[in-house]
Image: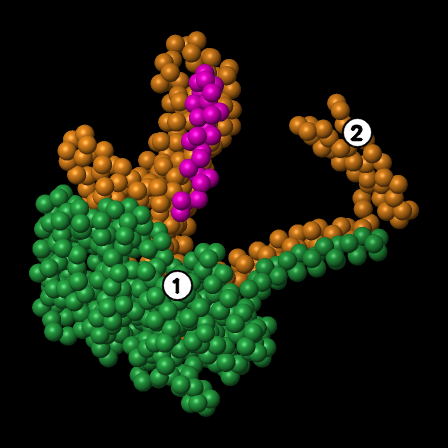
Amino acid sequence: MTAVTTEQAAPAEEEVVTVEVAAPGTAIAVDEEPEARRPAEIGRRTWWGAAFAAPHSIGLALFTVVPIVASLVVSFMNWPMIGGHTWTGLENYRRLFDDPIFWVVVRNTAEYVILYVPLNLVVSLGLAAWLTPRIRHRHIFRVLFFIPTITPLVANVVVWRMLYQPDGLIDATLQSTLGEHAPNFLADDTWAMFAVVAMSVWAGFGYNMLIFSAALDAVPDSQIEAAQLDGASPWRTFWHVKFPAISPSIFFATMMTLITSFQVFTQPFLLTKGGPGTETETLVQYIYNTGFQNQQLGLASAGAWVLFVIILGITAVQFLGQKRWVHYE
Amino acid sequence: MKRRLLVGVTAAAAAWGMLVGCSSSSSTSNQSKDKLVWSMWIAGSSDKAAWQQVANSVSAQGGPKVTIQGAPFNDYFTKLRTQLSTGSAPCVVSIQSLRAANYTDVLRPIDSYAKKGGFDLSAFDTTALNGMKVDGKLYALPYDTGPMLLFYNKDLFKQVGAEEPKPGWKLADFTAAAAKFKAAGKTMFASSVADMNLESMILGYNGGRVIKADGTLDPSNPTFAKGLDWLSSLVKNGTATQAGADNDTPSNNFVSKKVGMYLDGPWSLLSQKDKVKFPIGVTTIPTGHTSGPSTFSAGSGFGISKQCAYPDQAFTAIKTMTSQKVLTTLARQGRAFPGRTAAQQTWYENAHIDGVESVLKTAQKASTPLPGNKQSDQLQQLFSQYGIQAVNGQQSGAETMKSIAGQLGQ
């Protein structure tokens, strides 16, 4: 134990607190007087607590709670960006559900989620499983795979556009090897969504890979050894020992990936602007266009609340379903 | 104890100050008679330096101190709309002619200020000045103007054996040059679905337009749809590249010599000339089946926000910012084509591009201002989504325009 004990010389009316300053990697213990405290003292401590929590609480209230409540109120109003506001009740929601484009973007968002989430999980879990401690220089690989996650998405998009565009890297390679033109990925109805998903998976798998990799490292060796002694194949060891052990991490990653993929905006907006036509226009871009281009803040807020309800519903279903496959030990 | 309380309160106050400070660092609420804020799009450090010089010229002439509030061009109008609607409006507002109609509710008509001071508006280029008018009212003083033009690579034209396009060239000349490019295995023209480019090219081809001269939208115009089909035929027969959603691609393809020609405005000509590694040429948009105007012109200018409490001072500022002296200085620096006729000569002399004066004069004569509309921002977005399908031949022009009309609620 390398802990150093310091005793503060405090004024008479203050309690004496002994603080153990711990060395890195060791626990910090704070010894406190076991006796019941005087009410005045408790009050004072509460105030101090409140004072420390205040900056964050004020920030949370100002920048999160107030805007959320305001957007709910705005969603029931006709609120053009400039001009008067009137209460219209459910009119915005009715208009939204009557707009055929709204249903198109809901379908597009669902398509994106259905393609992106499983692909992201398979790629990240696959790479995490491959990056066992037996792989030489695994830390270098980890860093390499994580780089796309930390580079700005806007820069990634510029590079991917160069790959996708006619005469870009993919097209040029196909021309020189097969003599065939590649499709114009970002401008073709059939390919645009796949192109957006592929770019998103590349940019997004690193985060989940890191979570899975850390979780796999934490699976006790004794369990794996026991399985191996029992003659389990690597495949069986993975599915019946490692996978259940890391299932809480997988659940967490699935949930976060689902939530963020419903909110997808940057990749399609920068790669295709939602086109060709509305092929890659997502719900968030629809909300953005409605708010900032058509200047209908009420309608845009209603769209945002619909998105919130969809995400809430799906997250709730996942929580209910987790009992079947997530093991907490 | 007291000391601790003091520390706590100070810390809380500092945190609060940081929060408040963050939200008001770019506030325009501290404008006064002697201090105005000017909102402008800024593309880089050289842009910033040039505009700073313009801002400084105002106080140098005894006017108020003007502070620039910049944003990249792509975000500028989104930000401006939000600013002007929240009451933190900058007094001096930069605006594009084709967007002026979008902002008449938040901009102040300036005719009366010009009249009051006996300000001579006739010194401005007529097309530039007309572009800043909506329903007969003037909303900004123009600093630049220009018709859409075609920039071309002189070397590539020579290399494929095509004749260099002369100002006022016709569709047949365009087709003949395209054939030479094709024979040499090159692509002549870079497709673009940016609103002004698309609309100008079609106006030259058959006079079809999606915004009528009075500013009303006409998305189901059959002539315009036919124009889209023509652009699509250019892609199909290899004259033009496929269109993409990124509006910078045509310019990039031109600089990297992938195409021989693309559409742009005189505001980009001199900066593009410095960028390319070949002699740059410039010509008018080819005219096809039309006897009317064959290109759209647009420009930018400085207006005054409606909420500005110091409109007289703001007018003094924009007067200086578009003065003969300032615009001539900008022209000498190789920036946009000036909105004042007298400053244009300096620009021509500084351009050092063969025949640029006759090209611009021919194009100006053949041009008409692209009118704005309350939905023109939305139209621009829709062109970048749906225009691709038409130009790349996945849909007919008529089908595309039907989808766009549907989205515009027409």
Q: Residues within 10 Å of mark 1 (few under 14, many from 20)?
A: many
Q: Is residue B377 left or right of residue B19?
A: left
How many numbered marks does the figure carry? Answer: 2
Give, as a three-letter code, the residue at label 1: Arg
Q: Which residue is mark 1?
A: B335
Q: Amino acid at mark 2?
A: Val
| Residue drawn where x is 16% and y is 31% of the image | A178
Residue at figure coordinates x 40%, y 41% from the top left: A257
Residue B35 spot, x, y in % from top left: 58, 74
Magenta residue span: A131-155
Whether residue A194 appears in this view of the structure is no
**Residue A41 is at least partly visible in this image:** yes
Q: Nearer the viewer, mark 1 or mark 2?
A: 1
Chain to which mark 2 belongs:
A
Cα–Cα gap, marks 1 and 2: 68 Å
Q: Nearer the viewer, residue B189 or B31?
A: B189
Q: Which is more toward the observer, B401 or B100?
A: B100
